[in-house]
Amino acid sequence: MKTVLITGATSGFGKAMAEKFAANNYKIIITGRRADRLAELEKQLTQNYNVPVHSLEFDVRDKEKVFTAIKQLPQAFVTIDILINNAGLALGRDYFEDADTEDWEIMLDTNVKGVMYVTKAVLPGMIERKQGHIINIGSIAGKEVYERGNGYCASKYALDALSQSMRIDLLKHKIKVTGIHPGAAETEFSMVRFKGNAEAADKMYDGYQPLTAADVADVIYYTTTLPPHVCINDLVLTCIAQANSYYLHR
Ligand code: NDP
Ligand code: 8X3
């Protein structure tokens, strides 16, 4: 039975991926900051799919906590076959001159440094076994910049660079690295970005059918089903109304 570790599984893509992998008989490690949601999901996955599930509560920005949590995994969960770096967020949608510097720091610390910490903590086992798959959830915001996207776009461009760099460095260890770049998908993403302003969040999905978390989870799962010598390096997916990060037909 293979094991997948999914960061940011308390909502959106992460939760949908946990369900998808559990339905396909994986052992699941779920992480996030909201302990109540982790406990609820652990219960639901165990009941519905009868697979072993382990929850780790940490903020990916907290380096010490990340390394300690991974180091202290129970024996049954230490062999991680797939790591999905999904935890991330956007904060604010402002012109550069108006944007909040604290928002920038949180996005860069979470979307870039968080991925580095979790990956570094998980890697030794993959290197030892000469086998593993790391999937980084980027964004179309890391492929084309859009107006008032400054800090978020910068974080996802940096993550794209990191995915490319990891791919080169980890080739010799036979570790696959896949960058996934979704377009607009309806999750809690926009509620977080607009800091609880439901009207602004809902407006993002007006007049077209966005991706769902399940759509994204299905595509990500597919990338893990290929033969050992085949790797999807980079994958952009959008709903049919979206051509790129700034052209959306409503
Ligand atoms: P959600 O807000 O629904 O989920 C985000 C998840 O990330 C939550 O589980 C949250 O858990 C976790 N998270 C956020 N910050 C931290 C942190 N500091 N430490 C640990 N966990 C954290 O959004 P999505 O599911 O949409 O987003 C998932 C990923 O997909 C993100 O990287 C996002 O940038 C990316 N993305 C989203 C798109 C969209 O349109 N929805 C499109 C393209 C990419 P908790 O709060 O419990 O810690
Ligand atoms: C989320 C998609 O277009 O809001 O990464 O940046 S977008």
Image (cartoon, rainbow, N blue to C red):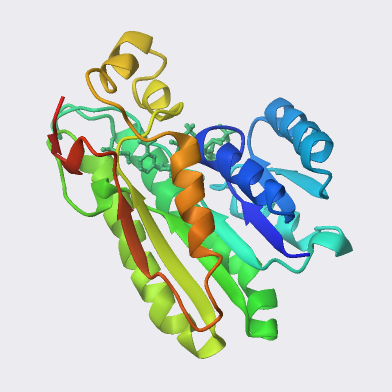
- Give the vertical position of 72 relative to 22 (above or below): below
Taking depth in this image into account, of 17 and 60 the one nearest to the observer is 17
Q: Quadrant of the C terminus?
A: top left
Could you say where residue 130 lies in the image, as x and y percent from the top left?
Answer: 63, 85
- What residue do we see at 60% from left, 74% from top? 132
Q: Quadrant of the N terminus?
A: bottom right
Could you say where residue 177 lies in the image, as x and y percent from the top left?
Answer: 46, 70
Query: Residue 204 sits in which quadrant?
Result: top left
Q: Is residue 167 left or right of residue 47?
A: left
Q: Is residue 144 left or right of residue 92?
A: left
Q: Is residue 127 left or right of residue 43?
A: left
- What residue do we see at 12% from left, 36% from top? 147
Query: Residue 175 sits in which quadrant?
Result: bottom right
Residue 86 in view in this figure: no
Query: Residue 200 sits in which quadrant?
Result: top left
- What residue do we see at 45% from left, 58% from top? 136
Could you say where residue 140 lies in the image, as x and y percent from the top left?
Answer: 26, 48
Could you say where residue 168 lies in the image, as x and y percent from the top left?
Answer: 39, 82
- Give the vertical position of 183 relative to 248 (above or below): below
- What residue do we see at 65% from left, 76% from top? 126
Taking depth in this image into account, of 243 and 36 the one nearest to the observer is 243
- Give the vertical position of 235 relative to 111 (above or below): below
Taking depth in this image into account, of 214 and 143 the one nearest to the observer is 214
Q: How many marks?
A: 0
Q: Is residue 115 left or right of residue 104?
A: right
